[in-house]
Amino acid sequence: MKFKFILSALTAVTFSAVAEKPNIVFIYGDDIGYGDFSCYGGEVDTAAIDTLAEEGVRFTGGYCTAATCTPSRYSMLTGEYAFRNKAAKILPGNAPLIIDPSRPTIAQFLADNGYKTMLSGKWHLGLGSPDKPLDWNGEIAPGPREVGFQESFHMAATADRVPSVFIKNGRVVGLDPSDPIEVNYQKPVGNDPTGITHPHLLKLQADEQHGKTIVNGVSRIGWMSGGNSARFKDEDMADTYLRKAQAFIRENKENPFFLYYALNENHVPRVVHPRFQGSTSLGARGDALAVFDWCVGRIVQTLKETGQYENTLIVVTSDNGPVLFDGYWEAGIERQGTHDASGPWRGGKYSRWEGGTRIPFIVTWPGKSKPGISDAIVSQVDLYASIAELIGKPMPKNAGQDGQPLLSTFLGEKLEGREYVIQEALTQIAVRKGNWKYIPPGSVTERLGIMTWKAGSGWKETTVPEPGLLFHLTEDPAEEHNLAEIYPNRVKEMKAIIAEVAPEKAVGEKGLNKKQLGF
């Protein structure tokens, strides 16, 4: 379904009077669940985030679009559901760019309307063209610059995937030309030790998938050789991304800007700076949450120091639900105690259960947003259309087809949000409408604990028979009582939504797909 809107003259006048071009900051967490922040009931003290929640709107019905990272990031930046792009799945570190540069992202849209734009942090949307091998030793393009980010400082994919380097404006940072980088995900390259051949060199033990080339004492997914002077140190990653983001803010005191600050925390490997190690009772995962909150606080402080805080719209959210064990033995399961990363919801990363896509979602515009807690259903796919509404500019015709303009909802002025929201997990989808949740036939995949593909452990699949699963979330947040047989008309209604939005997804796919999981 395509959503179109006409900005009323009244709305345009109202917001032009407030601020012609307010700054916009997206602070995007990684694998942070609904229950991870203390303002959502978590046991790690996230005071900086809680303050933003108190000054703005904290959503209880906020969603990313997918239960894994690449699809959610794609949807947020394009305003399009990721299942419409078959390439929008969990990408290896050497995958080509999956965003079509001819379709303006939110970054390109804002750049075209006078904004300075920057990415600092995780990218994971591909680099280079599909028609030729990517040369890590020269100019890396297309990438963030070609889709609207005038400045960019990022890693290629994830911290657990090679190449383990930073990329600034299309060039690997600190690369020695005499030590060229080579990356391969199908076969070994170079002579670097791996976690499988040299486990005694590891400071963090990992499973077979994460047992390839060792960088900084941590084995990764994929093989890498060369680029030794450019390889990052995990412990310094958060500080590095933060400094780049702060510098961008300070350099643009006189310019409206859009900052996409995509932190690594708390994706694996969770190797934080020594000053944060042991700072929580939850082990490495809790320490990573403390790092995330500290970084949020430093961004807010920088905005205040430069006099820009009052004129900045800040969104704090996450790319998908939580995962306690994801390839590295960090004691995430053993140290969780009574902390529930998914809050009251079932499941987490990779799954169609609520915990996979219902995430923290906080929107703050100091002095402009109406503080409070909102139960409205909102999705990250709506941010593009809502930002267009904010600056009073029409969206490009070839962008943002699945988003809705919900600016008044995001600012707490309206209680109503979306009528329904689509949830995706490993190419399978579900739909929530009101208090009802429907999962079509197929299977629901859950990440449980230690994984061994040969033994088949670590993953759980729940087979979903006809006519699917229907839950009433208010009465059954754990999604345990299937009401599909009792309310056939409700099932029919939910099926009709899927048939309209994504007819090819009306019947879910079955079985785990290793390729979708990055194998």
Image: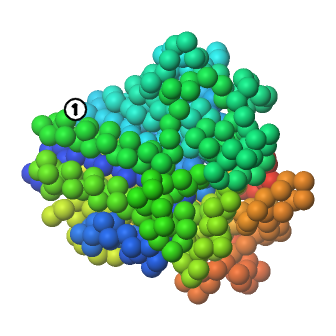
Q: Nearer the viewer, residue 5 or 309?
A: 309
Against 434, is 75 above or below? above
Against 322, is 389 above or below? above
Against 427, is 128 above or below? above
Query: Which residue sits furthest top?
Result: 178
Residue at screen point 43% across, 61% down: 276
Q: Answer left or right for 477 relative to 233.
A: right
Residue at screen point 51% across, 57% down: 266
The residue carrying mark 1 is 114
Residue 112 point in image, percent of width and height: 29, 30
Badge 1, how many Cα within 10 Å: few under 14, some, many 20+? few
Q: Secondary structure at mark 1?
A: loop
Q: Answer left or right for 366 relative to 230.
A: left
Q: Where is the C terminus found, in terms of image quarters?
A: top right
Residue 119 appears in which quarter of the rendering? top left
Q: Nearer the viewer, residue 453 or 217?
A: 217
Please say whether residue 280 is visible from this viewpoint: yes
Residue 285 point in image, percent of width and height: 54, 63
Tell me which amino acid carries mark 1.
Gly
Please say whether residue 505 is visible from this viewpoint: no
Residue 162 appears in which quarter of the rendering? top right
